[in-house]
Image (cartoon, rainbow, N blue to C red):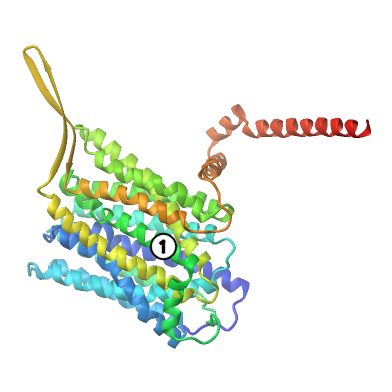
Amino acid sequence: MKLAPNTTITPAERARGERALVQDAAWASLAGALYGGVIQVGFALALGAGPFIIGLLAAIPLMAQATQLPAIALVEHVRQRRKIAVIAVTAARILILSLAVLPFLDIGDVRLTWLLIAQVAICVLGSIGGCSVNSWLHQFLPREGLGAFFARRLFWATSLACAGSLATGMLVDHWAFGPKLHAYAVAFALAGFAGFVSSWFLAHVPEPVMTDGGPAVTIRSRIVAPFRDRPFRSMLLYIAAWNAASNLAAPFLAVYLMQQLGLSLGTVTTLWVTSQVANAMTLYLWGRLSDRLSNKAILAVALPVYFACVLGLVFAAVPHTAVIVLAALYGVHFVMGAAGGGISLATGNMGLKLAPHGQGTAYLAAISLVAAVTGGLVPILGGSLAHWFEAVQLSVVVRWGLPGKSGEVSVLAFARWQFLFALSFLLGFLVMHALSRIREGEEISERVVMQHFALEALRTVNQVSSVAGLLGNLFNFGRLRERRLVARRSDGIARESERRAETAA
């Protein structure tokens, strides 16, 4: 298979390459869902992992992004990004496939050690591949229509990830062919094969010949350039704040649901799928808005909603009825997923947009490096805090008394993981401050974004729902708008007539 760069890329080849990128992302996300996330947390807990190990597993992927620094030198020296990416990610997927043996080994804590070692190797290889792919896509994809393309790519990636995660959760819960650990072996084997399919599609995406980003400079200068670029430095500060706030509690959400609330792995995966379904349902809307408005405006709306949901997780366990608790959790996950779709799409687009043309390798690697440092250290800190919070509890109790009778009601009780969610919510204010310092073209208010989002949602519903058509006939907003325009034209004509009459007089 030819992996060398293409000297010329025709429009038809570019279109086929974009379709291959969508398929690559879909199969790669399926592999990630079968191997990582909730499934990996469940596997680690089944092996006896504590909060620190869970935090470490979550930190490794982000800390491994630091290897993008030497990867920059590799890309600049070899100048064949497709070859580097395909080899690196395929090697990582071989390691994922090898994990299918781990559940059959009865060697106690050694299995956790090997899981951590494999996680490091997989993430380092993925980081090297990611550095190559970032630079490659930065040059391959046109600047126009990025929102729609990434929305389509993320939609299919999310869809396959949901199906894989949900199926694996059900497989583990209903496994009847021996120890439940063996169900994870099946998941890891399928993850490896899905990864190989992803590598095949990635290898069929054309790669333009690398262009220089200006005069010849040293690798060190290329690495330092993004940090000296003042406008881009604001972007890096936002990335640092966002990764710190989101990764303080997010890695422990599955642990909180399974250990503190007592939910099964299957139920936790359905909650995760609910979040991802909401993500997929709104990605198309976010993509259209990012192309029409600005990424910063979308973040100004989506970030507060996301952190409000994080705070909502603190209160999710307040009701004593299991049905109410589950309903609250599903609602919070749905809204959080919708907001998360806007955040991931707008953040990625803004990084591509603010990076100077021809210097995508270094600038996008700088984003990954900042995410690695902050997002890598914070989950470890979160695991340590969770261990300390294990013996801490904060309760709000209402006492009441009547003649001959008294009692008390616990209104709210904070314990262990809930402290992390509350701290993550507070860090959200730091994220909003960092976002306010970014300059991305014309400033657009949050109100305009919400109006456009509502209109796009209504338009989408009108296209797929006969009920919406009925609503459109009953409440024809288009006619109201036409009447308003007619009224404005009439007023304008009247004022123009008065002005001419005054001038003539």
- Crowding at dot 1, Cα within 10 Å, few <14 / some 14-19 / many 20+, comes out as many
- Please tell me which residue lies in front, 188 or 300: 300
240 with respect to 318 (left or right): right
Return the residue at label 1: 26
Percent position (x, y) of residue 113? 14, 70
Percent position (x, y) of residue 102? 16, 69
User: Residue at position x 38%, y 57% from top?
Assistant: 160
Where 307 sits versus 496, above or below?
below
451 with respect to 219 (left or right): right
Image quadrant for the N terminus?
A: bottom left
Image quadrant for the C terminus?
A: top right
User: Residue at position x 49%, y 51% from top?
Assistant: 298
Percent position (x, y) of residue 131? 41, 75
Percent position (x, y) of residue 263? 19, 45
150 with respect to 168 (left or right): right
Extreme residue toward the top, this view: 403
336 with respect to 7 (left or right): left
Extreme residue toward the right, this view: 504
Asked whether residue 206 is in view, the answer is yes
Where 104 sits versus 409, above or below?
below
- Please tell me which residue lies in front, 83 or 287: 287
User: Residue at position x 15%, y 66% from top?
Assistant: 103
**Where on the picture, by quarter, is residue 33?**
bottom left
Helix or strand or loop: what does disc 1 sit on?
A: helix
Label count reads 1
The amino acid pointed to by label 1 is Ala
**Where on the picture, by quarter, is residue 144?**
bottom right
Asked whether residue 201 is in view, the answer is no
